[in-house]
Amino acid sequence: MDIFEKCDGFGRARELQAMGIYPYFIPLHGSEGTEVEIAGKRLIMIGSNNYLGLTHHPKVREAAVEAIRRYGTSCSGSRFLNGTLELHEELERRLAAFVGQEAALCFSTGFQTNLGAISSICGREDVVLCDRENHASIIDGCRLSYADVRKFRHNDLADLEQHLQRAHAQKKGILIVVDGLFSMMGDLAPLPEIRALADHYGARLMVDEAHSIGVLGAGGRGAAEHCGIQPDLVMGTFSKSFASLGGFIAGPAKVMHYMRHHARSLIFSASITPASAAAALAALDLIQARPEMRRRVLQIAHRVRTGLAAMGFSTAGTLASPIVPVIVGDQERMLRLWRTLFECGVFTNAVTQPAVPLGQDLIRTSYIASHTDEQIEQVLSRFADAGHRTGLLSSQPPSSASQAAGR
């Protein structure tokens, strides 16, 4: 059998392209953060993880430019050998202090952070307990670890405890890994209860704060701060609120020292570019200095969530989330809604399996602190229009639904 033969049988994407409802790999010709330009048309961007709107902030931009002037465009090597800058070490010190841990370690992407952290600290004699809806990078990090990986039902504390009881009885080293804020449904992990279970059974807790750091908590430290607990390991990314690219893991100094010498995705990858490290540092300054940004983005998301629900859309998420999913269920109907919204001038994300369970196909929307009230009014109005055009909403006139949503 030819290894390429499987490619001949993959036709779904081509079918969707032929139907005009293929939603992926769309090139942007320009971006101003809350609006993007695609093929000469301007759309309101509600599909970005730029939650605080810092990708276009002048301080972040200037920090990146100044780093290029000083260090060039690349480190041209790994952290392990020739690619460590003073910027990297300053960023690690600042991040460790920010999340209340002894030390931190920066990786080139968030995906690589989870791959390296989990696979280096967990081995054949260990058990990893992983929420079934964790991010793909966590799942793949578990697979690379050679540990006994046991998935528990999403946010199901009883199921988690059963796994903990078995692993504890086997005298295994145990790591519980969860997303603090789940990126598709926008729901929070029950962190206080998970922390209590971890302590009771002698397990360690790792929380992925990719979508919550900068946004949740009184100081912007993420879901753990929002819930009033301290994980053993804190993971975060720079590609969301930090307006950059990269990721970090923070925890006890001895654990970070161990990971420095065992995490393959760190040792064998080029380090974060100077511009990315400087941008993340500048973003951290703004996160600490301007708490009103996170209040604003959560207010916007709440307004949209309640407005869409008032129209008759099925939404999910919590008050403490900048993510507002609109659940459609059927893949083709979801893609037709995505296409109609696109035609109406709204950029959203079409999400299907394996990112969500079968039958949970959804339009993922996420909001930015710099969205204007006028833009949000337009989003609600265009959702109402698209909902009626696709038959997902009742026969109520779009104007009435829009007015109800704005209250």
Image (cartoon, grey):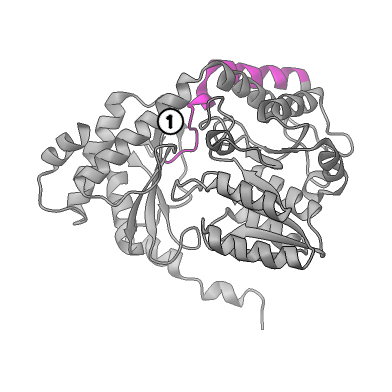
When the figure is inspected, residue 306 is found, relative to residue 289, above or below; the finding is: below
For the point 56% across and 64% down, the residue is 159
Residue 224: quarter of image: top right
- Identify the main secondary structure in magenta: helix
In this view of the protein, which residue sits in the foreground, 388 or 2? 388
Q: Position of residue 298 (x, y in %)?
A: 41, 31
Give the amino acid at mark 1: Ile
Does the image show residue 135? yes
Position of the C terminus, as image quadrant, is top left
When the figure is inspected, residue 298 is found, relative to residue 5, above or below; the finding is: above
Q: Position of residue 172 (x, y in %)?
A: 78, 62
Position of the N terminus, as image quadrant, is bottom right
In this view of the protein, which residue sits in the foreground, 162 or 43? 162
Does the image show residue 20? no
In this view of the protein, which residue sits in the foreground, 254 or 286? 254
Q: Is residue 276 left or right of residue 22?
A: right
Q: Which residue is mark 1?
A: 368
Q: Position of residue 32 (x, y in %)?
A: 44, 26
Residue 379 among magenta residues? no
For the point 79% across and 32% down, the residue is 75
For the point 57% across and 44% down, the residue is 192
Q: Position of residue 368 (x, y in %)?
A: 43, 30
Span shown in magenta: 47-70
Residue 72: quarter of image: top right
